[in-house]
């Protein structure tokens, strides 16, 4: 399992307001960095992206996460 270093967590929090914990979020950054969890998560959400491919689901997930982080960075 991959873990973020303390400096990386601070950078994400300070620059993108992203944290590895939240009460109202069902998936954390640390979970997304766990390869086994991520693979299962992509299998679980691929139907939400109207695809059978975990590669397409992963691509869409990354685009949405990128958009969210940029949006939060420029609006808060």
Image (cartoon, rainbow, N blue to C red):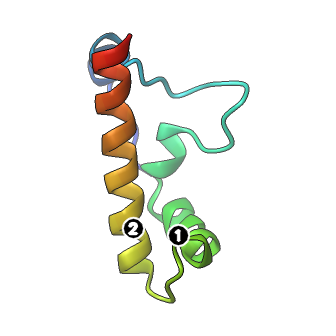
Residue under pointer 2: 58
Please indicate whether residue 19 sits to the left or right of residue 62 in the image.
right
Seen as rendered, the residue at the extreme right is: 23
In the rendered structure, the answer to whether residue 17 lies left or right of residue 40 reads left
x 32%, y 54%: residue: 63
Q: Is residue 48 above or below residue 63?
A: below
Image spot of residue 32 (x, y percent) = 47, 50
Secondary element under disc 1, as helix, strand or loop, is helix
Label 2: how many Cα within 10 Å (few below 14, some 14–19, many 20+): some
Spatial CA distance of label 2 from label 1 is 6 Å
Viewer-nearest residue: 53 or 11: 53
- x, y percent for residue 67: 33, 41
Q: Is residue 38 left or right of residue 6?
A: right
Q: Residue at x 64, y 25 (%)?
A: 22
- In this orientation, which residue lies closer to the viewer: 33 or 75? 75
Between 4 and 14, the one lying in front of the other is: 14
Q: Secondary structure at mark 2?
A: helix
Residue furthest front in the image: 75
What residue is rendered at 42% in x and 49% in y? 33
Percent x, y of residue 50: 53, 80
Residue at (34% x, 29% y) in the render: 71
Q: Are marks 2 and 1 in contact (CB under 8 Å)?
A: yes
Could you say which quadrant of the image residue 44 lies in?
bottom right
Quadrant containing the C terminus is top left
Q: Residues within 10 Å of mark 1 (few under 14, many from 20)?
A: many
Where is residue 18 shown, x and y percent of the image?
42, 24
- Residue sticking out furthest to the bottom: 52
Q: Is residue 6 visible?
A: no
Report which residue position mark 1 lands on. Answer: 42
Number of numbered markers = 2
Compared to residue 63, the image places residue 65 above or below, namely above
Q: With respect to residue 41, does 11 lie above or below? A: above
């Amino acid at each position: 399992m991959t873990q973020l270093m303390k400096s990386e967590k601070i950078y994400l929090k300070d620059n993108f307001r992203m944290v590895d914990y939240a009460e109202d979020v069902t998936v954390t950054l640390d979970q997304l960095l766990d390869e086994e969890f991520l693979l299962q998560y992509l299998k679980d959400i691929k139907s939400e992206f109207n695809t059978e491919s975990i590669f397409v689901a992963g691509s869409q997930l990354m685009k949405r996460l990128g958009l969210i982080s940029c949006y939060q960075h420029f609006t808060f």
